[in-house]
């Protein structure tokens, strides 16, 4: 079966920052699971999945525009430590959750002061060119539940 809208895909991937040091490798754990057609993956990766089937391997380079977005230089903010959720003594480089007026945002600590921290609210991979090596493990038809929830259910996907 080929990957098209409303199929559930499991796959392993190696992710590499082009010209950089960041790497990620799913092969030590469960394959990643997603419902195709709902932007559950980075656009540049999801587009490349279309038409593939179990056993297919491919590589794709993803630009920031089709990946985690461009870096926003206004993404640096100074926030009181008491506005961080669940982190009393943040350390440089920590990923923290900031409670803002209307939402919770993830950010990276770039400077720690006594009462405040400076955080970068850009995704750590924003602005980066990425290369994925993908192996498609399985493709199946989505259940009606999955389509109505707009995500895949099961190990590697949503479990609720
Ligand atoms: Zn669900």
Image: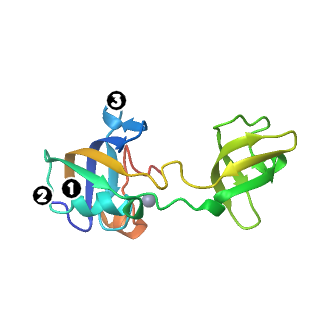
Q: Is residue 123 left or right of residue 115?
A: left
Which residue is found at the position 20% from the left and 63% from the top?
50
Camera-near label (2 vs 3) is 3
| Local SS, label 1 | strand
**Which residue: 23% across, 59% down?**
48
Q: Residue furthest front?
A: 19
Could you say where residue 28 lies in the image, as x and y percent from the top left? 34, 29
Q: Give me the C-alpha separation between circle 3 and circle 1.
A: 23 Å
Is 77 on the left-hand or right-hand side of 144? right
* Residue drawn 37% across the image and 63% down it: 66
Which residue is outermost to the right? Answer: 115
Q: Quadrant of residue 95?
A: top right
Q: Secondary structure at mark 2?
A: loop
Numbered tag placed on residue 140 in the rendering: 1
Which residue matches tag 2?
A: 1
The disc label shown at residue 112, or none: none
Q: Establish if 118 lies above or below 74.
A: above
User: Residue 71: x, y in percent?
Assistant: 53, 59
How far separated are the C-alphas under marks 2 and 3? 26 Å
Disc 1: residue Cβ within 8 A of ligand 1's nearest atom: no
* Ligand 1's quadrant: bottom left
Q: Residues within 10 Å of mark 3 (few under 14, many from 20)?
A: few
**Disc 3 designates what residue?**
28
């Amino acid at each position: 079966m080929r990957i098209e809208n409303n199929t559930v895909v499991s796959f392993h991937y190696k992710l590499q920052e082009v010209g950089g040091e960041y790497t990620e490798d799913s092969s030590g754990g469960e394959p990643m699971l997603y419902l195709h057609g709902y932007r559950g993956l980075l656009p540049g990766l999801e587009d490349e999945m279309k038409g593939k089937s179990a056993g297919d391997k491919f590589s794709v380079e993803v630009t920031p525009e089709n990946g985690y977005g461009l870096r926003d230089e206004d993404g640096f903010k100074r926030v009181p430590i008491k506005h961080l959720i669940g982190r009393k003594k943040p350390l440089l480089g920590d990923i923290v959750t900031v409670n803002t007026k209307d939402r919770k945002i993830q950010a990276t600590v770039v400077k720690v002061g006594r009462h405040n921290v400076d955080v970068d609210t850009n995704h750590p991979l924003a602005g980066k060119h990425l290369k994925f090596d993908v192996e498609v493990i399985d493709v199946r038809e989505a259940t009606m539940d999955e389509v109505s929830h707009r995500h895949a259910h099961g190990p590697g996907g949503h479990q609720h």
